Image (cartoon, rainbow, N blue to C red):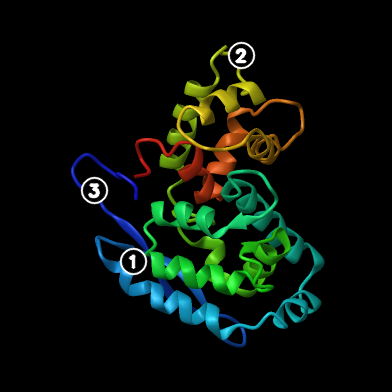
Amino acid sequence: MLALSSAATLSFVPALRVVPTRSRAVADVSIVADAPLYAAANQPFLLRTIMSATSDAVDEICDVLPAEVCDDIEADADAVFSIIDENGDGAISRAELMEHLMKAGYKETAVNVLFEKLDTDKSESISKDELRAGFKLYTPLRSAPGLGAYNADFVKEIHQDADALFAAIDSDGNGAISKDELRDHLKTFSSYSFKAISNIFKLLDVNKDGGIEKEELRSAFVKYSALRQAIGEGPNFK
């Protein structure tokens, strides 16, 4: 949730709404203000949306879309995967998904259903390919709290959070966050492995110059609520 002013604080939770397209209606995620218990009420809708899809639809979706569309979805899924895969072993365990999403306000039952639907090979772990498929099939996941661009409309506030975090992590004040500085920050409050931290660093260092610039962190904070939750939420994101 975002503290929008000193006079009033609005809590934000996800709610599915139907958005008309050229030929059909699709499920999407919108923001509902001032509904503290709405998360519990809306999750069954999200779960029913997930249950209604089948894995066979993945190839069909990408066959009829421009190649770059699915490429972008896969890149977003890979970014979220890197953030949730706390031990960096290349798979998301039920415990990792549970810990991450319950911080974002999901109930245990909802997380378990999500895990079962994403773990299509029933290996008790979600692979990178499985999360990619899930992002293609289940549109709400791409903008759900703790996963995608939730609250992306509040760019000013999110940038303030990113700037505050940047200043805290950039300990030498050289205008870029090094891998060592990111590691030192994450190790103070998280269980991220060195491998997982390296994966997050690669995600943030978009231009591959060996450092995370302020604009790179800002952009990632807007795009991934999973990242804001994982590495430092800031005063505007509770």
Report how far apart the C-alphas of labels 2 and 3 lie in the structure. Answer: 35 Å
Question: Amino acid under label 3?
Answer: Thr
Query: What separation in Å lies between label 1 and label 2 (alpha carbons)?
Result: 41 Å
Vertical position of residue 50 compared to residue 101: above or below: below
x and y, in percent, of residue 81 in the image: 63, 53
Q: Amino acid at mark 1?
A: Ala
Q: Which residue is mark 2?
A: 174
Q: Is residue 213 above or below residue 92?
A: above
Rendering quarter of residue 32: bottom left
Residue holding disc 1 = 39
Q: How far is mark 1 from mark 3, CA to CA?
A: 17 Å
Residue at left offset 48%, top offset 37%? 159
Q: Secondary structure at mark 3?
A: loop
* Residue appearing at x 43%, y 34% in the figure: 160
Question: What residue would you read off at disc 3?
Answer: 9
Q: Position of residue 74 (x, y in %)?
A: 71, 60
Q: Residues within 10 Å of mark 1 (few under 14, many from 20)?
A: some
Q: Residue at x 81, y 66 (%)?
A: 67
Of callouts 1 and 3, the N-terminal one: 3
Q: Residue lying farthest bottom? A: 23
The number of numbered discs placed on residues in the rendered structure image is: 3
What is the x, y in percent for residue 182?
A: 59, 27
Question: Looking at the image, is mark 2 or mark 3 earlier in the sequence?
Answer: 3
User: In the rendered view, would you say 81 is above or below 15?
Assistant: above
